[in-house]
Amino acid sequence: MSTPTVQYRVAFGKKDEVVDGPDDATLVITIAAADAGMDPTVAYMRGKLKSTGPTGPLLELLHSGAAAAVIGRLASRP
């Protein structure tokens, strides 16, 4: 199985979001900026972090902390 491509989206408001990753990604992870300070695994379990695509790679990203690092970087935009 090939590694899926991932796109992260942190939404600050309607039509105002920071995106990191290719538009044709197999896994898209979306979270509101207001919830970005929350642990991504907790946010996912509470329904605050949304995803489209395969769940396995999402859970790996949450477990490894890779998702938290990218979400934190995007949420702290200048």
Image: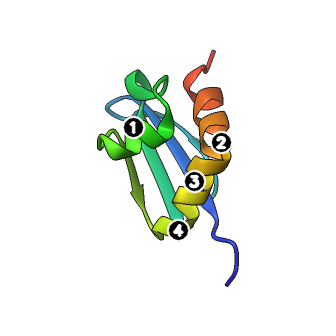
Q: Which residue is mark 4?
A: 56
Crowding near the residue tagged with mark 2, few <14, some 14–19, many ≥20 C-alpha atoms within 10 Å: some
Disc 4 is placed on an element classified as helix
Tag 3–tag 2 contact (CB < 8 Å): no
Q: Amino acid at mark 1?
A: Ala
Residue placed at 49% from the left, 32% from the top?
39
Q: In which quadrant is the C terminus drawn?
A: top right
Alpha-carbon span between mark 4 and mark 1: 17 Å
Q: Amino acid at mark 2?
A: Gly
Q: Along the line of sight, which residue is nearer the eye, 67 or 21? A: 67
- Disc with the residue nearer the chain's start (2 vs 4): 4
Disc 2 is placed on an element classified as loop
Q: Which residue is mark 2?
A: 65
Tag 3–tag 4 contact (CB < 8 Å): no
Alpha-carbon span between mark 2 and mark 1: 13 Å
Q: Position of residue 50 (x, y in %)?
A: 37, 49
Alpha-carbon span between mark 3 and mark 4: 15 Å
Q: Which residue is mark 3?
A: 7
- Which residue appears farthest toward the top when viewing the image? 78
Residue 57's place in the image compared with 1, above or below, is above
Colouring method of the image? rainbow
Label at residue 43: 1
Relative horizontal placement of residue 71, taking residue 2 as reference (left or right): left
Residue 43 visible: yes
Residue 34's place in the image compared with 23, above or below, is above
Q: Position of residue 63 (x, y in %)?
A: 60, 49
- Disc with the residue nearer the chain's start (3 vs 2): 3
Q: Amino acid at mark 4?
A: Gly
